Image (cartoon, rainbow, N blue to C red):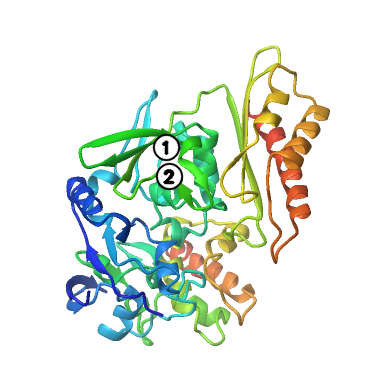
Amino acid sequence: MKPAPFDYYAPTTLEEALALTAAHGTDGKLLAGGQSLIPVMNFRLAQPTVLIDLNGISALQRFTATESELKIGAMVRQSVLERDPAIAHLAPLIHATMPYVAHSQIRNRGTLGGSLAHADPAAELPVLAVARDARFRLQKQGGDRWVAAADFYQGLFETALADDEILTEIDVRPLPDNVGYSFHEFARRHGDYAQAGVAVLLTVDDSGVCQAARLVYLNVGDMPMDAKGAAAMLVGNVITPELIEAAAQFAAANEIAPSGDVHGSAAYKRHLAAVLGKRAIVEALSKV
Amino acid sequence: MSEKFTVSAEINGYPVSKQVEPRLLLSDFIRHEVGLTGTHVGCEHGVCGACTILFDGAPVRSCIMLAVQAHGHSIETVESLGTPDDMHPLQEAFHEAHGLQCGYCTPGILMTLKPWIADNPNPTEHEIRTALSGNLCRCTGYQHIVEAVKIAIEKTHHTEENE
């Protein structure tokens, strides 16, 4: 298998890369880790005529980690998210979820920004970004804008990223100490695309009343599915086993849109989402 | 679009410099341009792990990288491990435990494991199986591969201490 021919550019500065995206518009495709793009190019499902390789831009491979701020360059490798002690401390949900992302060989090459911008509904990182209200910096020649993760995802592999923009930086706010977190997914084999998965964040006050909740599901819709109704059921209440069951069932019945495939029917995926949601709420609650 | 680019890389400690089309996959560069056919090509879309090499010391799948991306970088392939007369402890262990049958997946498994066993002196069997999860073997059922990993860890970490 060989990719179709393309013009190749390997800029070493962001300015060069932005000039290339401005010049090539819809013809230009950005190459990050390439762990999704190159396979589809090998199959010729994608035949970009211009490939702009971001791997030579060292400025995109840095991150800032302080107690109050965690900003990660788009080209930071997933293996760094998995292993860096500062990121593990400030973003324990991301750290705990990384082993679910494909295999170690993929994470050594795959990047945070590449996965976020690819917007595969089965991917873990977009779900975490939505659950944490991460913000994405989209830069183009002569300007930039910050977009909330929830607004970035617009449909199946569709995002707010314009043809002349590059996702350069992700503002992952450090997780406050009083937030309980959990990620659960189910896949047939380790490293396969999950059939369903969910990230849960819970804040509970001293009297046991839930102050804030997020439940965001993967691969049961066209994009990360934010179950706001189920979260609203938890907020303002003491979280009991009955309430956990009710919220997980509500999300699975009303707030996701799974489609059946060779691995399971839509009904099976709703069942999985309910089970995983319940487990994730219980675990998140135990970490508050 | 067929403009060629220079790839100057270090492969198994030796400098290599070639002119290549940008669409050439790194796996094909290693096999066809450099002539190191120990790196095997299975699925060619990043699933089977047969083409795993070390890129700047970290295991990656060479079939989903472009050869031009290796410019200025260091690559290790299975040929760097040992020779029939002087095998790497991993190779000895796979030989002793019968950790292969047809051998097609073996180079990728060995290159995945080389840095991993160095970093993991006392893994559980579950951790060994997780480390192997990105490499498919259709012959062995993995049991002998897991045994080989245990022997390799013994040879690497625990034999010298006893001497």
Query: Image quadrant of residue B124?
Result: bottom right
Q: Chain of mark 2?
A: A
- Give the image location of residue A63, x and y in percent: 32, 38
Q: CA distance from mark 2 to mark 1?
A: 6 Å
Give the residue drawn at x 57%, y 77%: B137
Report which residue position mark 2 lands on: A81
Q: In this image, A286 relative to B91: left or right?
A: right
Labels 2 and 1: the sequence-earlier one:
2
Give the residue drawn at x 21%, y 71%: B10
Label 2: which secondary element: helix
Label 1: which secondary element: helix
Report if the CB atoms under discs 2 and 1 are less than 8 Å apart.
yes
- Give the image location of residue A263, x and y in percent: 70, 64
**Where's the N terminus of chain A, which quadrant?**
bottom left
Report which residue position mark 1 lands on: A87
Circle 1 residues within 10 Å: few <14, some 14–19, many ≥20: many
